[in-house]
Structures are given as C-alpha cells and as structure tokens.
Image (tube, grey):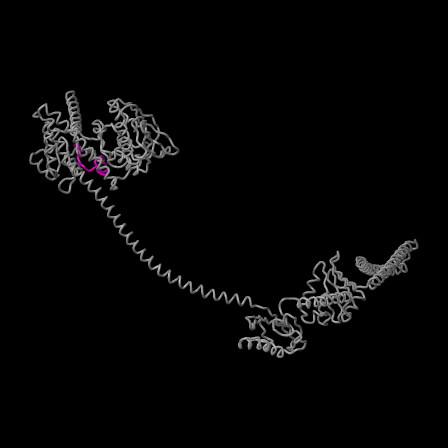
Amino acid sequence: MTAASLGETSRRDLEARITELERENAKLKTVRDALIRQVDRSHDFTGNAYKLFQSVADLETSVEKRIQRLARAMSEAKIARQQLQQAIDAIGEGFILYDSSDRIVLCNLKYRDFFPSLSELLKPGTHFREIVQAAAEAGVIVEAVTDPDAWVASRIEYHRRKSCQFQQLLSDGRWIQISERATNDGGKVTIVTEITHFRRLEETRRLTKVAGQSGLLATTIANIAQGVVVFDADLKLVAWNSQAAMLLNLHYAGMYSGMRLKDLARQVWRYGAEVPRERRREAYAWIGNVKKRFPLRVELSYRGRRFIAANFRTMPDDSFVVTMTDVSAQIKAAKLLEQSKEELEKRVDERTHELRRLNEILQDEVWRHEQTAADLERARKAAEAANLGKTRFLAAASHDLLQPLNAARLYLSALEASPLVDPGARGLLDNIAKAFQSTEALLSTLLDISKMDAGGYRPRITAVAVGELFETLEAEFGALALQKGLRLRSVACSAVVRSDAQLLRRIVQNLLSNALKYTDRGTILLGARRRGGNLSIEIHDSGPGIAAENHLAIFEEFKRMIPAGTQASGLGLGLAIVKRAADLLGHQVALKSHVGRGSCFSLTVPLLPPGAGELADGTAGLADFDVPLAPEAVSDRQGGALGEGPLFVLENDAGVADALTTLLDYWSLTSIRAPSYPALLEIAQQRNTLTPMAIIADLHLDGAVDGIDAIILLRERLGRDVPGILVTADRSREVKERARAKGIEYFSKPMKPAQLRAYLSHLSAETRAASTAAAAIGDES
C-alpha cells in the first residue's frame, strides 16, 4: 500500500518535470533560431559566432539526454504501476485505497466484483460519499434497503474511525466483512472479505444446537411435575405430557396429536371437572380473541376437594400453552386461613367489646384520679397560701410586736436612769433587760425567716474578701471565746468570693455562735480551702458532736440536738437561718461530725476570677439585717453636727413616743414630738423653735410624708444638714439604702437605748469640738 502511494507520487513528479523540460526546450529552440539568423546576417569572420552556435548545440544535446532519462523513468514508473495494479488484482479480497481527501487512488477487480453496479464510480478521483450514496440508492446492502439515510450515516461514521471492522449482507445473499484502517499520509485502506461460507457454517451449528435443545426440552416437559398442553393456531393439540392427563383425570391414550380443543374440553367436563360458568366464558373468550390474550388463570375443581390451576399463555405464532398445577393444598390452606381469619375477627370483636368496657371503667377511674389530683392541687395551693399567710402574718405580727417592745425597752432604760429606783432593785432590772434581749433576738430571727420565706429578700451578689470577714468575726467573737476558756483561731485567707456580703456574714456568724454555744473546752478554728472553682469556708469545733441521724434535723426550726448534761442558750433558729440563707444564695452547707470528737460545718462559695469585679465595702449588704455599727463608723456618714436646739421626735405611736421622750428627759435632753411632718412644723412654729439638735423619726407617720422625706424636707427648710436618725421596724434593703443615700442613720426597732445615747454623745462631742475651734479662730482674729 505504501509502494502504490509512492508510485503515484513519482508519476506526478515526472509528469511535472517533463512539462517543465518541454517549456525549456521550446525556449532553447527559440534561442537557437535567433542565433542562426544572427550568424547569417553577421560579417564577423573571427569565429565568435561559431563558438556561440556551438554552445547552443551542446546545450540542446544536454537537454535531449535529460529528456531521454526522464522518458525512461516514466516508462519504469508505468511498468511499476502496472505491476502494482496486477499484484492488487491478484489479491483474493476486495481492495480500495483513498487519499487524504477521501478520493479513490487504487481499486482492484475483486472489489468491483462485490459491487458490479458501482463499477462506473470505482475509478481514481471518485469521492467516498458518492460511492456510499450510490450503494444506498442501488440497494446493494440489505440494511440500506429499509432505511437508506440511516445506513449512509452509519457507514460514514464507521469510515471516520481510525480503524473498524463490521459485517454486511449483500442483496444477492452473500455476507462480506469490511475492514478499514488509516494510512500514515491521512488516507484510508478498505479490505472487503467474503464470509458467506462461515456464516452458513455458524447457522448450521446453531440449528443443530436448537434441535438438540428441542429434544432436551421435550424430555424436560415429560418429567416435570406440572401438566403441559400445547395447541397450535388452529386449536389442535400439538404436544402434552402424562402429568396433564393425570391432572385432568383423563386417559393418556385418549389424548392424541391433532385432537381438537372442543373434543378435549368435552372429555374434561365429562370426567368431573367443574368450572364456574363465568370463568368458563372467560376462557373461551381468551382462546377466541388472538389479539387480546393476556395471562389467564382458571381453577378446575374435582370431587374429593381436588383443585387444578390452569394457566393460559399465548405464543408468537398464535398458538398457546396451558400449564396445570395441583393447588389442592394451597386452596385448603387458604380456606383454613379464611376460617382462622373469621374466628380471629370474632375474637377481636369480643376483645374490642371487652376493651371498650374496660376503657369505660378506666376512664371513670381516670376521672376519679383527676378529681383527686384536682383536690390535692387545691389542698396544696391552700397549704401554700396558708403557709404564705402564716409567713406574712408572722412578719406582720413581729413588726407589730416590735412597737410595744420598743416602748417597753425605752421605759426600762428610763427606769434604769431614774434616781428613784432602789439599788436593791437593780438586779431585777438587769433580769428584765436580759428577758427583753431574748425576746428581741427571737422576734428579729422570726422576722428574718419570714422575710426569706415570703421572698422579700433579694440577694445582692458582689465580690467579698474572705480574709476581712474572718478578721471581723474573730474580733467580734474573740472576747466571748476567752470568757468560756476557749481558743478561737482563724486562718489567713486571700480569696475573694461571689456572694451577698451580709448574708455570707450572717451565715458564718451563726455557725461560729453555734460552735461557741456547744463547745466547753478546746479550740474553734475558722478557715477556708480551695476546691476547684469554689471555696469551702469551714468552722471546726471540739464540741460533743452530732449523731448522723440528726444531721438534717438540726437545720429545722426550733430543733436543738443537745447532748445530755449540756446547757446552752438559744431557741434552735440559728441553723435554720443558715440553711435558708445558703439556699437563697445557691451555696451548699455540709456537716461532718463525730460524736464525742467535734463537728465541722462547711459552706461552699464560688470563687471570683481575678479582675472579675470590685470588692464590696465593709458595710455592703447591711441593708437587710440589723448589725449595730460603732459610733465612729456612724459619724462618718453624718454631714452636720449637733445643734443647740431640742430634739425633733416624729412618731405616730403614742406609747413609743411617750417612752422615747421620757428617756430623753432622763438624759436631760429636751424634745418636741409630733405624729406627722405638718404637725411638727406647726408645733415648732408655735414655740418659735426651728433649729433642732437632731431629728429622730419613725418611717411610718401620719399623713403622706414618711420619716425619711420629713427629715429631707426639714433640712431643706432649715438650710443645713441636720443629723437625722431613722428608727423603724421595717428592715427591708430598700429602706436602709434610701436612708443611707440621704445621710440618715438607721436604727431598727426595738432600739437599743445605749446605742442611741452613744450616738447622740458622739454628735455632741463633735459639736463642742467645732465650737471650740471656732472660738479659737475668733480670738486669734
């Protein structure tokens, strides 16, 4: 194939070269003729003209030799081409060569023999598409007869591939195999081989195999458990097996090839087969309608509860096959299943009826439970309301009890200061004072508990320095410990916790007080341990210890687990306050105790991360629980000094007002009292006394102005910051903060006369010091 391509190229080159040489030869002839004419006209006898002519003659001779060589080359190329064509024609397969433009270069005789109707086109220069289109129109290929356009498109697609191989059936019955492969210069070589003999051998083998399979199929049908009956398009029996005769209750010899369907059906009905009339009509309709033969199943029943399922299936040549299976067991099982279903439905109905009855009973029971739950809920709410009412009543009762108790204490203080009291009665007065102190402590504790239970206390969480708290409590309880012969020791602590400063102080204070009460000898230790992100504040004592079964009971009100032979004061409310305050803050209180060895109460408080907040001041949280302050601490809050006038007393309770003014009289202090702010102004104006020494006011007064506002209005009216003292039984945080914000000192009822006298004395000392300083300045001037 490559030699043919090279031969064609050489031939074209030789033809081009010959054409060029012929043009040059014509030019040389023209030159020669011109030179001859010039020689004829020339009179030059020197020989130059002859030399010129001689050179032209030599050139002509050279050209003729080259033409001769070229002619020989063309002759050789022609011979080579003829030999190549003969060699290609000698090939037993069809051969055709296309160039890169899909045009024929060479085609042998065998290829023309395959396609004789295309012989006019099978010559050099014809395009591939022309040949394919002509083949489709002539019907040379069987496949092209039905859809020429599709075959042309398919043939072109094959031709575009680099290599391909496929088979085609010619219209004369021959089979050919076409193989195509691309050449190096972009052309295409096509080889056509006849394979008719091989296809026939393959078909023969296939038919032989089918015949063998038919015998195998016949053997299989004869031995399967199902019955098989085959009818042709004329409704005549073609094939059957013995199982079919047995299932249809027929004699095998009674069935024969060519037997009509009607005759076979008569025998089937005669030998006891029963089919519902509608199903029989469906079967006959199926057999008669060849175009609508969908799969059909008909059940035949025989005596003895035997059932045969006949399945009708159509075949391509309008014949059909009937397969038969004994389904007696399945039918029997289905009937048993149906009976079971009916029995089950009956039982379900019975159970449903029973469940409905039980459901009604259950609904009635649920209704009763709901009624009971509603009654319990009402009882719970009533109990909560009663408990809240009890708490509020206790708070109100405690508040109301404080008023006469406050008056009694003031009268008692006045009596102690009176010179009329016999010295022998002083002991009796001391006992009365101690009784008043116990009563005040009880009422104060009850008031605190009721406030917590009623939700009247809102903790103020701040940063609290534990070390400062320990120092304060050690100083406060150190003297009491020495009196009992105990050693109170605190461990230095630099931790800062997040808590309510006053509640935390109250909790630790109560725990320390409890330890002092029940410890007769040894040491009481106040310290703290870091536990992760928390701090455990611990109070260790060497007291009698608490039994394990009483660890929870001691935190209840009025529960005191005192060992035999132990005497201690108190009412059993200290630990109840501790538990309520800890729960309010979300802190955990724990107890570890060994009987005879001592106890350890601990309070777990969250630590404050570094830089998370500022420390609370020393008086933070004092707004909710009454903690007496030293006079020097009180004086820092007052903006003014004690004046020269009387004390203004604002109190709407006549008994308390009488007791307070009586006490002030025994202290040689004059006073003006009134139940309200307008009444005080009126009395002061009548007496022409509008410059008081200080103002002592209860919070709740007659009229719209309370004690704090009255002090503020009097200060504004007088134009100076008169010292103000608020004496009230209201211990709420709001009242204390409101008083503190206005520079008013807060005393809770029942008021301690000694505390009031110390405070007034401190103010008087400041006044005298200020007067002395002013006089000294006047003398110097």
Nearest to the observer: residue 744 or residue 526: 526
How far across and how far down the image is residue 640, in percent?
18, 30
How far across and how far down the image is residue 286, in percent?
58, 75
Quadrant holding the N terminus? bottom right
Residue at 26 percent across and 26 percent down: it is 477
Residue range highlighted in magenta: 722-740
Nearest to the observer: residue 118 or residue 274: 274
> Looking at the picture, does residue 230 appear above or below residue 423?
below
How far across and how far down the image is residue 522, in percent?
30, 23
Residue at 26 percent across and 28 percent down: it is 518
Quadrant of the rendered image containing residue 567: top left
Q: Residue lying furthest top in this view?
A: 780
651 drawn magenta: no
How far across and how far down the image is residue 32, in percent?
87, 59
Nearest to the observer: residue 716 or residue 252: 252
Q: Is residue 716 visible?
A: no
> Looking at the picture, does residue 382 appear above or below residue 236?
above
- Image position of 758 (left or right of 41): left
- Image position of 728 (left or right of 104): left
Q: Residue lying furthest front in this view?
A: 304
Quadrant holding the C terminus? top left
- Image position of 667 (left or right of 257): left
Quadrant of the rendered image containing residue 258: bottom right
> Looking at the picture, does residue 254 appear above or below residue 338?
below
Q: Is residue 94 visible?
A: yes
Q: Exactly how many numbered labels are in the figure?
A: 0
